[in-house]
Image: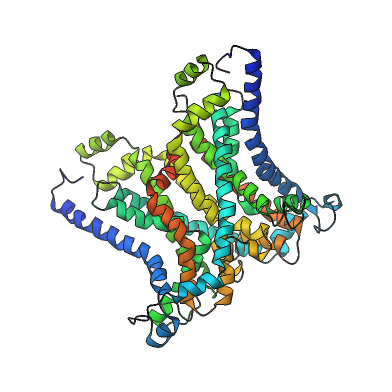
Amino acid sequence: MADRPRRTRGRRTDRLWIGLMIGLPTLLVVGLVWLPALATVALSFTQWDGIGPVSSAEFVGLRNYEDVATIYPPFWPAVTHNLIWFGAMFLVATPLGVLLAVLLDRELRGSRVYQAAFFMPVVLSLALVGFIWQLIYSRDQGLINSLTGSEIDWYGDPSVNLWAALVASGWRHTGYIMLLYLAGLKSVDPSLREAARIDGAGEGALFFRVVFPVMKPVNLIVMVVTVIESLRAFDMVWVINKGRNGLELMSTLVTGNIVGEASRIGFGSALATLMLLVSTAFIAVYLRATVKDGTE
Amino acid sequence: MSTHAVGPRSRARQLVVPAFLAFMALAWVFPVALAVVSSFRDYAYTASHGYFSLGGLTLDNYRDAWAAGNFSRTFVNSAKITVPAVLLTLALSSSAAFVISRYRFRGNLALLGFFTAANLLPPQALLIPVYRLFRSIEVPFWLSDSGTLLDSYWSLIAVNVAFQCGFCTFVLSNYMRTIPRELYEAAAIDGAGTVRQFAQMTLPLCRPALAALATLEVTWIYNEFFWATVLLQTGDKYPVTSSLNNLRGQFFTDYNLLAAGSVLIALPTLVVFFALQKQFVAGLTLGSTKG
């Protein structure tokens, strides 16, 4: 403790308050996030119908994982869809957001208006985004079909619905990345750019050789945000069709196995544990980029 | 930045970039604009005259959507969840951030990491234990008419606060680190204890960060969909976002009505965004570029 209060009584109440101020939030986060996460991992090694007490759960080792990988048909499609989801965000939506940020970073007339336009979808919930895009995708009255005369059910047809959802989701993701990146760009020392310009660097070289390297922490954050958001993708797909018929994702499989008709707790937990593993790896990267001792 | 760029290439760029941005911005606004325009159009009129006709303007969609989507109830429900959750999140995370940034103790940074990480975990992966936990806690009926914490606002508020505390603690502790230590030392010499330092010095100094986070959290918790869907079970408790599905089920064919419902749901967040854009952007960027 940095200071030394004069009276021990005051010091004791101080300590009590400090304990409460950090203790209460910690308790909540431990109780509702970290302990449940550990419980999920533990349950993934058991078999439990969820009806009796937890003590009736039976230890089955890795069997749930084996079953998930071998005899559960939606598993590999879901993994593939999550990877495609990530690929589309990482290769299209994220770079587009970065490009828009770079273009908006100069003092351009109307820059604020553009920013507001790109960012507007981010304030809408993903569930609502899925809903609004129905006006474009609907088979009978949707905009695409009434313009082109096609009869594709964009949200229903399993060969296209993932891509339809990705366009809608990318619409929102791009704005989010644009904003994060723009904030990062603003914090780049302007003299770096001036120096590079004087050396005759073109816009492309300026970005890739000078700006991009010094933006390393922001680049990492943007990448992790993209991974995590792709892994957590849920709301939109759940609104469209509860994640069936071409839209299976890890998150919807977990939810379906627990709130659905047959609640297979151990099995659902094995799926959930896989999600936790992937996210923890990337969260570690995120923490290394962001959480630092602020004293330097 | 065109003061020293006068070559023909850069002049072309001066035209291309704004044109590209303008095109993209229009494309980005389009889906929302389409929803707004559709919401004012009469279904029978567009059905017979086609979508690209003029006329057939009406306000009926809003009246009907309001009634059918039970918006007078779901908006109140959303407020009952969002307001306490945001206040609690800010109260708890500002006190946690105060302790983390003010005092040096072992595990200080680990604790911050542990808060921040909690915000990034996939909520679906925690569903089973959280669901079971709430179901197993029995409470008197005056607290929750289901007899347990499941299907009550208590559980929904608690889980939202637990998740959002991570992000807010992270942002606020970064912000509080910029407060000079000398200020605290002076306050301590004046005899101000921990609580007074926190309430009378730290909190007022953090007003900009708190305003930014409040804006952001109102939007996020209002938009929260997953926990509301799985933890609430009685139809009349659903917040605005979860009632989306019901609205569609009832009006499978009338997309203009659906558009009106969407606009109603989006309206509070859009108003917050346009009125407090600066706060909103500050909240997000505080979390990503500082620290």
Judge left or right: residue B272 versus residue A198. right
Q: Is residue A93 visible?
A: no
Give the residue furthest to the top: A6
Q: Is residue B52 left or right of residue B92?
A: left
Q: Nearer the viewer, residue B118 or A254?
A: B118
Dividing the image into 4 quarters, which one contains the N terminus of chain B? top left
Residue drawn at x 51%, y 77% as measured from the top left: A153
Q: Position of residue A295 (x, y in %)?
A: 47, 24
Q: Nearer the viewer, residue B78 or A197?
A: B78
User: Which residue is at the far front?
Assistant: B142
* Looking at the image, residue A11 lies above or below residue B38: above
Percent position of residue A174, x then y: 41, 55
User: Is residue A221 rendered to the left or right of residue B110?
Assistant: left
Q: Is residue A205 above or below residue B244?
A: above
Please say if A241 is above or below B201: below
Question: At x 28% / y 48%, what residue is drawn?
Answer: A204
Residue B160 in picture, x, y percent from top left: 60, 48
**Count of picture labels:** 0
Residue at x-position 44% and y-position 23%: B180
In the rendering, at what x and y percent does residue B264 appear? 47, 65
Q: Nearer the viewer, residue A193 or A29?
A: A29
Residue B66 seen anywhere in this rendered image of the structure: yes
With respect to residue A30, does A100 lie above or below?
below
